[in-house]
Image (cartoon, rainbow, N blue to C red):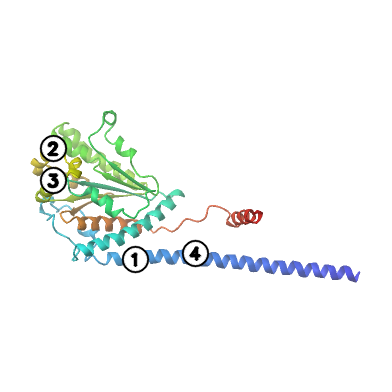
């Protein structure tokens, strides 16, 4: 009888000890998870601080300085100016490198959240006259970004298939998925400007597209997509120099098209057409930013700042583990013991 009581007491003591160990283990696991959470939060805060420090180089935010307003005249903008930045090219290139690293961090965060259903995503529309630097912006601003989650598409003359559909059909096909960044080199605005310049459609047709595009962009923005519309403001003199470089370098011949000279001859008509585009389609949901582009390092800086601050303002955190962590570790550890 005594022996039974002793055994019972031993079992009770063992059970109590196991409970303490389990509680201690659970407490340790909770503390470990808490430390991990704090570490992640600290890292996110550090990235936010880095982004704020980068923004501090501007006397005023580009989103404020470069945004189109009702009084803005495209032809009044000095293409060689550098609104909001007093540094030189070396300073600008250092900024681009640092900002690109931050953009890469925010892009990975946005992509991870997109996998879990978060609707945040970004659409960047790049417009400008030929040789205004659209391609260079893509290469420099996104130099450190993981290709996974980035989609680039250049819109040229509509194909036969595209002409069989509404003009927005080909645009919708290329919109970013959740967590992605899409970059449009030219866009739906070509379907207003080119018919206007070339007279390929009646005026009432292309003029109706202002309201159609506004409705379309409002729909896209309301679904969680930030739209950043960029027009690179270049000068005829700078364009001429870039054309001459293309004609002097066999490795750049492919960039030159005689039709570029035809467009150049109608420069003023294009400026007038784009002015009306900005007046009709710069909205709170999808504003236009007019960026001086003769100093290409400056235009790359400005686009980088607009994109980085847009993504930062999503205020995202890393998504939680969508699995039973303890069970996953148990299975992996058991697998390790087998070997």
C-alpha separation, residue under disc 2 versus residue under disc 4: 58 Å
- Tell me the tag on residue 258: 2
Q: Nearer the viewer, mark 3 or mark 1?
A: 3
Image quarter (top left, top right, bottom left or bottom right) of the N terminus: bottom right
The crowding category of the residue bearing disc 2, from other C-alpha atoms within 10 Å (few below 14, some 14 to 19, many at least 20), is few
Q: Nearer the viewer, mark 2 or mark 4?
A: 2
The x, y position of residue 331, in whole percent, is: 62, 53
Does 207 appear above or below 138? above
Q: Which quadrant of the structure image shows residue 103?
A: bottom left
Q: Which residue is mark 3?
A: 248
User: Which residue appears at 14% of the width and 42% of the height?
Assistant: 273
Q: Which quadrant of the structure image shows residue 81?
A: bottom left
User: Which residue appears at 36% of the width and 56% of the height?
Assistant: 104
The crowding category of the residue bearing disc 4, from other C-alpha atoms within 10 Å (few below 14, some 14 to 19, many at least 20), is few
Q: Which residue is mark 1?
A: 50
Q: Which residue is mark 4?
A: 37
Does 47 appear above or below 111? below
**Labelled pair 4, 1 in contact (Cβ < 8 Å):** no
User: Which residue appears at 72% of the width and 69% of the height?
Assistant: 17
C-alpha separation, residue under disc 3 versus residue under disc 1: 42 Å
Q: Nearer the viewer, mark 4 or mark 3?
A: 3
The crowding category of the residue bearing disc 1, from other C-alpha atoms within 10 Å (few below 14, some 14 to 19, many at least 20), is some
Front residue of this view, candidates 210 and 138:
138
The crowding category of the residue bearing disc 3, from other C-alpha atoms within 10 Å (few below 14, some 14 to 19, many at least 20), is few
Helix, strand or loop status at disc 2: helix
Helix, strand or loop status at disc 4: helix
């Amino acid at each position: 009888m005594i022996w039974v009581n002793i055994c019972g007491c031993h079992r009770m003591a063992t059970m109590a000890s196991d409970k303490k160990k389990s509680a201690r283990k659970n407490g340790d696991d909770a503390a470990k998870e808490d430390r991990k959470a704090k570490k992640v939060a600290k890292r996110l805060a550090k990235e936010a601080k880095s982004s704020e420090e980068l923004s501090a180089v501007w006397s005023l935010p580009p989103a404020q300085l470069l945004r189109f307003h009702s009084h803005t005249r495209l032809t009044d903008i000095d293409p060689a100016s550098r609104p909001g930045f007093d540094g030189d090219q070396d300073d600008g290139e250092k900024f681009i490198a640092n900002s690109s690293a931050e953009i890469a961090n925010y892009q990975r965060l946005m992509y991870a959240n997109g996998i879990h259903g978060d609707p945040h995503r970004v659409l960047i529309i790049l417009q400008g006259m030929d040789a205004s630097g659209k391609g260079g912006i893509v290469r420099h601003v996104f130099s450190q970004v993981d290709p996974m989650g980035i989609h680039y598409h250049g819109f040229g003359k509509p194909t036969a298939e595209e002409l069989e559909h509404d003009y927005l059909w080909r645009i919708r096909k290329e919109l970013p998925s959740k967590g992605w960044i899409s970059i449009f080199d030219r866009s739906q605005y070509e379907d207003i400007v080119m018919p206007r310049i070339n007279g390929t459609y009646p005026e009432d047709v292309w003029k109706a597209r202002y309201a159609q595009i506004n409705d379309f962009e409002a729909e896209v923005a309301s679904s969680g997509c930030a739209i950043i519309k960029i027009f690179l403001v270049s000068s005829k003199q700078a364009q001429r120099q870039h054309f001459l470089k293309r004609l002097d370098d066999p490795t750049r011949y492919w960039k030159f098209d005689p039709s570029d000279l035809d467009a150049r001859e109608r420069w003023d008509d294009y400026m007038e057409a784009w002015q009306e585009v900005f007046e009709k389609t710069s909205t709170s949901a999808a504003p236009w930013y007019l960026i001086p582009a003769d100093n290409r390092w400056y235009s790359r800086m400005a686009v980088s700042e607009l994109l980085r601050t847009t993504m930062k303002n999503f205020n995202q955190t890393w998504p939680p583990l969508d699995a039973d962590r303890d069970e996953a570790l148990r299975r992996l550890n058991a697998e390790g013991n087998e070997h």
